[in-house]
Each structure stands twice: as C-alpha cells, then as structure tokens.
Amino acid sequence: MYILGFPLLLGPLVTLHELGHYLVGRWFGVHAEAFSVGFGKELAGFTDRRGTRWKLSALPLGGYVQFKGDMNPASIPDRAAIARTPPAERAGNFHHAALWKRALIVFAGPATNILVTLGIFAAFFMTYGAPGTADPAQSNVVTGFAENSAAQTAGLREGDRIVAIDGEPTPRFQDIQDRVLMYPERRIVLSIEREGEALRVPVTIGASVESDRFGNSSRVGRLGVTSSQMSFTPVGPLEAARLAVDQSAALVKMLVTGIGQIFTGERSVQELGGPIKIAKFSGEQLSMGPLAFINFAALISLNLAFINLLPIPALDGGHLAFYAAEAVRRKPLDARSTEIAYRAGVAVVLALMVFVTVNDLVTLPVFGS
C-alpha cells in the first residue's frame, strides 16, 4: 500500500500543480520547453507539436515546468543572460513577460492545489451534508464528561452552555474543539451560561496522546466534554463551497499554529513529516478506502500550496516576493542580491528536505521508536 499510495497521491497533485503553471503560461503566450513529473533523469517522455517535452523523471518528489528563458527548472533568473537576450528571441520568453503575467503564472500552481482541496471538501459536503447537532441550539451545551475531564475538574456541570473561550465566541461544538485541539495544557477562560447566569471559569486544557489504528500518535488538547449527538444537514453548492473555504481556512490555521509551536518548543520536531511519512500515511489511508484516501489527498494538496507560497527563494512564494519587490522598486533587484538570495533559498530547502527525511527514518519501527 505504501508503494502504491505514494505515487497515486503525489503524482496527480504534482501534475495538477504544474498544469496550473503551464496553462496560465500558455494563456499568456509563454512557451514551455519542458513539463516534468519528478526530477532528475528522464524515464519516459514525448515532445508535442508546440515543442514542449513532456516527461516522467526518476525522482518522484515533485515536478517542474521549464519555460523559455529559464536557466534551470527552478526558474532562478540569470540577470546577465536575460539582458543579453536578442529582441527577436524575447517572444514567449518567461523573463520578458510583463511582471503581472509572471506573478500570475507562478501563483497558478499553488492556486490549483487550493482549488483541488476546495473541490474535494465541497463535494464531500454536498454528498454527506454539513456536520452539526440534531438541535443547533444545544450544540455548545455540555451533555456529559469524559473520564478525567479537565472541564469537570475546573467546575463545569452538565447543562452549562460554553459561549466563548478567551472572549472568542463558540456558537458550535466544532468551534470549541478547534479552540482547544492544538493547545494542550494551555490555560484558558471559558465563558459559560448556567441557569441564566453568566460565569467565567478558568480551565487548563487537558493533554491527550491519541493513536489511530495504525499506531500513529499525536498530542492534542481536550476539555473532556460531550454535546448533543451529531447529525448532517443537506446543503447546496454555494453553501458547500462556503463550508469548504471555512474548513480549509481552519486547517491552514492549525498548520501555522503547529509550525509555530515546533519553533517555540511546545511540540516535538518529530511531528514534522517528509516524503517517507507521506508515503506511509498515503498507504494507510488507501487501505481504508477511496474516501479516506481522497480526503487525505485534499489535506496534502493544501499543504503543498502552503509550502510553495512560503517566501523562500526557489519556491513559488519566493518568486512572488521578488516580483513584489520589483513592483515597489519599479525595477528588479540587482543580480548579486538575487543570486545570493536564491542560493540561500535552495540551501534552506535542501537542508529542510534532509532534516525531515532523517526525521522520518529515525521514527520508523526498524529503529525501535
């Protein structure tokens, strides 16, 4: 399943990402010299009538579109070579396209991954409905407690309505879960309604290490309360799209929070994952059926968009940051600054890849973890 799940997951997502770059570039008249799924040596390919080489490469960890004028697959600009380009050869050249066109071409890749995620989530909401409680008015009312409940220890009772956490309204039970999941052992204040009386109750969120059926564990925050039984309400396309946006925004917020907690030491760096963990998880989700696998694909697609939009030179976000600087200065950064920034960006990306790969390896059962 690991061997099958990884290419089934990453292959389509990378292809769609690069197709975003390719299609917008073609729309703007920029010629693509190569479209590769994977890096390194070409395993198979063909050249279409427009002169684009479509190929499958040996290292299945990404892909690229190499446009006319690119010195390399990462589109790292060579200012001197760009300046020397004869006027007759500038037609269809990426680096001689208008700034706004280059920015849209670069942004199209991550945007495609975002659209894939939104499309999958919206399809799920339209198929199964919006999750909620049978009585929406009771969705944030405590109906019971788990064993060793942090909320019960702090003094909450059945029938209490949790209306806010640290002043942030929680009209739905899902809002309560979202506010505590990523913050184990954090001190918060619950605003509750009890028999018509407004109260403020300090609570330390409980920390729980939970494992799935495959033994993957994560440390999460729990209040230890239950609410009304969950139900699903049918929704139309527009509402499904809105819910998909909300779901994606909540996932990005969790992702940013998790990364921040790793930097501050609140979470272990072992929670970072690279290609080996993605292969492991993709195989596990595939073994659970197509719906679980498609849902996981939506999560990874959103992650790909997020990572690619980070302002690191050599990533899409790094290119966009340079274009923003060029728009403000009304001219590109000088060649020396550009070269140093891109070299540093490539070094950061490679170092991160090495780190997460080693991290993946040492957490495999063969090493005793």
Image: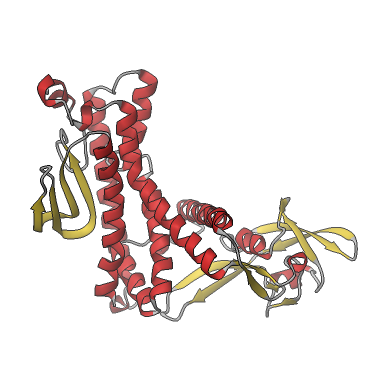
Question: 46 or 312, which lies in front?
Answer: 46
Which quarter of the picture shows residue 59? bottom left
Q: Quadrant of the C terminus?
A: bottom left
Q: Residue at x 69, y 76 (%)?
A: 229
- Position of the N terminus, as image quadrant, is bottom left
Question: Which of the 4 image quarters holds residue 326?
Answer: top left
Residue 71, percent from left and from top: 14, 36
The spot of residue 12 in percent (x, y) is 29, 60
Is 78 placed above or below 87 here? below
Given residues 334 and 204, the one toward you in this image is 334
* Depth order, front residue of 35/345: 35
Q: Residue at x 40, y 56 (%)?
A: 116
Question: Can you say whether 251 is above or below 292 in the image?
Answer: above
Image location of residue 134, percent across then percent down: 71, 72
Residue at figure coordinates x 59%, y 56% from the top left: 239
Query: Which residue is farthest right?
Result: 196
Q: Of residues 68 and 241, which is closer to you in this image?
A: 241
Q: Is residue 62 visible?
A: yes
